[in-house]
Amino acid sequence: MFEQEITRYQKLNRLAESNGVVIIGSGTDASIPVGELKQAFYLKDNIYNRSFASLKASDGIKVYNSCVEELCPDTVILHIGENDTENFDEHKKEFEISYRNLINDIRSSNKKRQIGIGPVKNVSSTAAEINGLLKNIAKAENCIFEDITTKNPGISHEDRETLSMLCSLGFVSPLKAKHHIGNLVRVLFCSGI
């Protein structure tokens, strides 16, 4: 499972620079246009998308070790859980163990590596339960959980144009992942692109 995508990402990694931001996501995250978002929001860090449409929490360590670890990222943003909603009640404990093990694996080679966690955007009660669990995991594991489901976090076209103009004039400094994981999560998952 995932062999083709992993091989493609490994080839892309040869062109990539280390110490950036890596997204590990599921569902539609694989199509997030990180290059365009980086440009539109003046993001300084290199951002790499290593997402898989059918990724589940139990696949996280395999994916991380196969095509993310070699990038030596400073920041990893996890957006996994969308594919875990089915039969969640029966697999809740396995989901939690898989997520915690993934976080520990991510930090095993760099204890200072920042980890951001984005919520499941589905509006079901199961998604709400997963998000509550993710929030608790983030708190216990010293990660940043950015809940983009409780309010309208999208960035409007007008705000995007204003931010772009202010950045180009030098009035606003570009977003830096080391200090703005929450902003990165909002840009990546709520920009409407």
Image: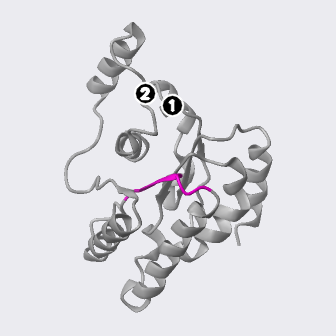
Please determine whether, in this image, residue 174 is positioned above or below residue 110: above
Whole-angstrom CA distance, mark 2 to mark 1, is 6 Å
Q: Nearer the viewer, residue 121 or 77?
A: 77
| Residue 71 locus on image (x, y percent) | 69, 48
Q: Which residue is mark 2?
A: 41
The label number, if any, that marks residue 38 in the structure image: 1
Residue 152 screen position, x and y as percent: 21, 46
> Magenta region: which residues?
110-118
| Secondary element at image label 2 | loop
Q: Amino acid at mark 2?
A: Phe
Q: Residue at x 61, y 64 (%)?
A: 108
Q: How many marks?
A: 2
Q: Compared with residue 34, is residue 86 higher up or lower down, i.e. above or below? A: below
The magenta stretch spans residue 68 = no
Instruction: State the image coordinates of residue 69 (x, y, percent, origin top left).
Output: 68, 56
State yes or no: residue 114 in magenta: yes
* Residue 68 located left or right of residue 103: right
Question: Callout 1: 10 Å neighbours few (<14), some, many (20+)?
Answer: some
Tag 1 secondary structure: helix
Which residue is found at the position 40% from the left and 85% from the top?
A: 92
Amino acid beneath label 1: Lys
Using residue 39 as the reference point, say whether residue 17 is left or right of it.
Answer: right
Asked if marks 2 and 1 touch (Cβ < 8 Å), the reply is yes
Does residue 150 show up?
yes
